[in-house]
């Protein structure tokens, strides 16, 4: 067991002895975000070849350049509707690499927008925030660029969250013959173990009713209350503009079916996934669960956001002009771009599993370039 996992386990055990069994959401929050022992708090970067998992950002700057094209169009929409400035907010910004790639592209392709940009990188990890100025380079020295631990109160522009919702804590439930029960984390001889207890309160049941699902008996499922709360918070922050979400997940009917009878919560360490022993290395591994897209869309609508599009990442990036960034040259840079493109749109990997959702507030119904007029119902 690593030092991080040992210290985190000591913290969790102390809380269990004080309060009784904790929810999975409480343990996940501690394991990922505890300010001293949490997985994200103890390193500025966790993804990439040397990390525990791989994201679109790790492929190279192509992903950020294509996102910049969509963000630039959003800026044009707001400018046409009379907005004086444009605020680019990245939530769950990590060490700032994606924001840097986006800003690099905007600075070259849309200098007028770039000059008027206000940028906020939102990141809970102090270790990651400490890297922002260095990673952003010349962008980080601009007076209109800031790091923060929470969303700004007032945003006219775009709030981007790439692979954030899947890293938010989830509750875990199991439908038993006696009804719905919640998986909690208790102690057995100093070891963290799962225990099954009756639901406390009605919030989880209301969540399932809201997405129109009744779990089949024997199915284990995650309940993303924190993701819903985050979408509601983002909607409150957005005065005018767009919410752009990129994450992997399913609609509720699929997510809570027998096809995912064991649930989707898993631990990632050294690029290996472990769904069974997720507690064993809590504090030194990534913990993640698939996003309930139905719940996210419903939360956004209830918070006053208008749905503008839902596509997979392949469709999104191709619509944004991915092929225009490629050529047939044999130079190293050209080969790298082609390899990056292949990884980003691989239907069996990032291209098919990642979904892109866009919502608007007081922007009408613009035909966003990345969505090819594919509206959500």
Image (tube, rainbow, N blue to C red):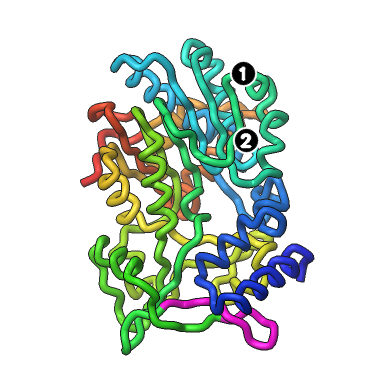
Q: Is residue 172 above or below residue 86?
A: below
The mark lying in front, picked from 2 and 1, is 1
- In this view, the residue farthest toward the top is 112
Provide residue 100's location: percent of width, then percent of height: 60, 29
Which is nearer the eye, 280 or 111?
280
Magenta span of residues: 182-193
Which is nearer the eye, 357 or 9?
9
Provide residue 104's location: percent of width, then percent of height: 59, 23
Q: Mark number for residue 97?
A: 2
Q: Where on the picture, by quarter, is residue 369?
A: top left
Which is nearer the eye, 295 or 246?
295
At x 61%, y 62%, the residue is: 30
Specify whether residue 339 is in view.
Answer: no
- Residue carrying label 1: 143
At x 37%, y 83%, the residue is: 218
Q: Are marks 2 and 1 in contact (CB under 8 Å)?
A: no
Mark 2 Cα-neighbour bin, 10 Å: few <14, some 14–19, many ≥20: many
Of the numbered discs 2 and 1, the one sitting upstream in the chain is: 2
- In this view, the residue farthest toward the front is 18
């Amino acid at each position: 067991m690593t030092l991080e996992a040992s210290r985190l386990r000591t913290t969790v055990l102390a809380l269990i002895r004080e309060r009784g069994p904790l929810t999975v959401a409480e343990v996940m929050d501690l394991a990922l975000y505890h300010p001293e022992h949490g997985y994200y708090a103890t390193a500025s970067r966790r993804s990439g070849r040397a990390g525990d998992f791989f994201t679109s950002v790790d492929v190279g700057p192509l992903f950020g350049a294509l996102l910049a094209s969509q963000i630039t169009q959003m800026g044009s929409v707001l400018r046409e509707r009379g907005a004086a400035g444009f605020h680019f907010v990245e939530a769950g910004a990590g060490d700032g690499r994606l924001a840097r790639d986006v800003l690099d592209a905007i600075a070259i392709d849309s200098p007028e927008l770039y000059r008027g940009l206000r940028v906020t990188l939102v990141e809970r990890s102090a270790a990651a925030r400490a890297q922002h100025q260095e990673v952003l380079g010349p962008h980080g020295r601009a007076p209109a660029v800031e790091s923060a631990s929470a969303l700004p109160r007032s945003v006219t522009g775009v709030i981007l969250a790439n692979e954030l919702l899947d890293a938010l804590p989830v509750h875990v439930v199991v439908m038993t013959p006696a009804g719905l029960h919640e998986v909690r984390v208790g102690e057995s001889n100093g070891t963290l173990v799962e225990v099954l207890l009756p639901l406390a309160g009605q919030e989880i049941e209301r969540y399932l009713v809201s997405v129109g699902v009744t779990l089949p008996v024997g199915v284990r499922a995650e309940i993303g209350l924190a993701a819903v709360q985050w979408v509601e918070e983002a909607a409150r922050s957005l005065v005018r503009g767009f919410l752009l979400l990129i994450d992997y997940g399913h609609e509720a009917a699929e997510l809570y079916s027998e096809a995912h009878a064991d649930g989707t919560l898993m631990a990632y360490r050294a690029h290996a996934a472990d769904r069974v022993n997720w507690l064993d290395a809590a504090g030194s591994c990534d913990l993640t669960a698939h996003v309930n897209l139905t719940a996210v869309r419903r939360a956004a609508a209830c918070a006053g956001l208008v749905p503008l599009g839902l596509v997979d990442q392949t469709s999104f990036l191709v619509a944004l002009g991915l092929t225009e960034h490629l050529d047939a040259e044999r130079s190293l840079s050209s080969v790298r771009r082609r390899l990056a493109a292949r990884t980003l749109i691989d239907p069996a990997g990032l291209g098919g599993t990642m979904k892109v959702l866009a919502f608007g507030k007081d922007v009408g119904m613009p035909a966003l370039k990345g969505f090819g007029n594919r509206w959500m119902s």
